[in-house]
Image (cartoon, helix red, strand yellow):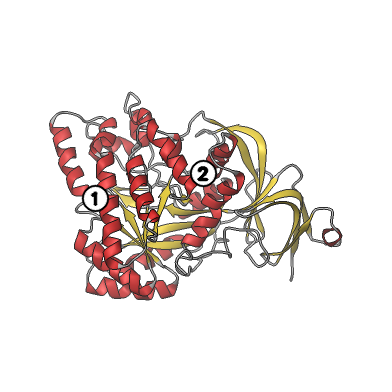
Amino acid sequence: MSTRTLIRGGLVVTAADELHADVLIEDGRIAALAAHGSDAAAGWTADRTIDATDRYVIPGGVDAHTHMELPFGGTFASDTFETGTRAAAWGGTTTIVDFAVQSVGHSLREGLDTWYAKADGNCAIDYGFHMIMSDVNESTLKEMDRLVQEGVSSFKLFMAYPGVFYSDDGQILRAMQRAADDGGLIMMHAENGIAIDVLVEQALARGETDPRYHGEVRKVLLEAEATHRAIQLARVAGAPLYVVHVSAEEAVAELAAARDKGLPVFGETCPQYLFLSTDNLAEPDFEGAKYVCSTPLRPKEHQAALWRGLRTNDLQVVSTDHCPFCFVGQKDLGRGDFSKIPNGLPGVENRMDLLHQAVVDGHISRRRWIEIACASPARMFGMYPQKGTIAPGADADVVIYDPHTVQTLSVETHHMNVDYSAYEGRTVTGQVETVLSRGEVVIDQRKFTGRAGHGVFTPRSTCQYLN
């Protein structure tokens, strides 16, 4: 039975265009666009018509970096796939790419199957997976080829967290060589974890135990050094590289220098680095623990370099690294020892609104907003044009966005399963009104109408910036 939805009267904004157009949706996909008031649009009929007058009609957001139910530091991220994807939908994100985790001594397959089981039947929106590699060896290198064929085409390695996720330079090189052969994309957490551990030990020995010291030991230079080293290893391997959660001016400079040489090197930043700073980490009475994440928040002066990188395309993607831990019962595991504070903060619901605020503030254009939040992540991870745009044949992942409503971000009103907001009390202009996922309305005029199990696993092709 065919179903048709018509979105009338809005300003359609994609990475490439802005046009006053009506959008026809049929059987979960975009069927056609036509200028509002044109003869073509006038002839369309539908089972449901959505009035988008004075609204933007934008592609659903693609958040390519989330951690639902991630085990970390003796606890688990507080959002499940059910609560996290519902919150994502409230925030105008219709696709997430989460991280399946390989445990040391186990196969990639076991890790991936565990994450399939966590997500299956629980997601309100579509999802894909990256694979965290914690144990690079002959058999896991062979598995990479099979995962790429299965639609899990990106692999995350860590230069940080010795004893947990850490890979040494030799392991990193071997994984990069394999990716160069099988079309996979290596994603890198670029921080010199060996050196950081020394600085952590020294800080604690001096009695420096408060959350702000988390930022002080994870030094900018150790992010820049690791970024530089990752780029050189990728050059040796002849492999592309995607550096996650870039937070500092010096790391952006390393990426820019590599891109100036024409190297296939890409960078992502996150809203927390654009809108928060070490001032938050220094909040008194252990409140700073709410802002402990890695890479850490930086002094405010780094924000200008990140915005500039987004404008010049030295940074291509804004993801959230959504990895929430409750302040009570999780973050407070680190009272008296900042190194025991679970790393991560909530944000999957806030990204599209914060980036729209960046449009209002003049940091980026409307089309660049859609590019860094929808189109570029979809291209980077092999989902475009199925995801990330509004065009005939694309999945009907569509957001009706009110650019005028002023809202205040708060734990009182958010839908993430966490007991604080990283952006508490911040006012932003713009709000998600209605959200469609593959043509199905999951948020209807600020009411959740979706369901767990609507979202499906989305296999991905390889990075579309390399073809």
Q: Which numbered circle lies on residue 39? A: none
Q: Residue 294 appears in which quarter of the rendering?
A: top left
Q: Position of residue 411 (x, y in %)?
A: 50, 34
Q: Is residue 179 visible?
A: yes
Distance (Cα) linking label 2 and label 1: 26 Å
Viewer-closest of 465 and 322: 465
Badge 2 amino acid: Arg
How packed is label 1: few (under 14 Cα within 10 Å), some, or many (20 or more)?
A: some
Quick check: 179 left or right of 229?
A: right
List the residue tagged with mark 1: 161
List the residue tagged with mark 2: 351
Q: Position of residue 252 (x, y in %)?
A: 37, 46
Pick whichever of labels 2 and 1 is earlier in the sequence: 1
Quick check: 28 left or right of 210?
A: right
What residue sits 55% from the left and 44% below the top? 352
| Disc 1 element | loop
Q: Position of residue 204 (x, y in %)?
A: 16, 33
Q: Position of residue 142 (x, y in %)?
A: 29, 75
Q: Residue 275 appears in which quarter of the rendering?
A: top left
Residue 202 in the image: above or below residue 128? above
Badge 1 amino acid: Tyr
| Disc 2 element | helix
Q: Is residue 135 visible?
A: no
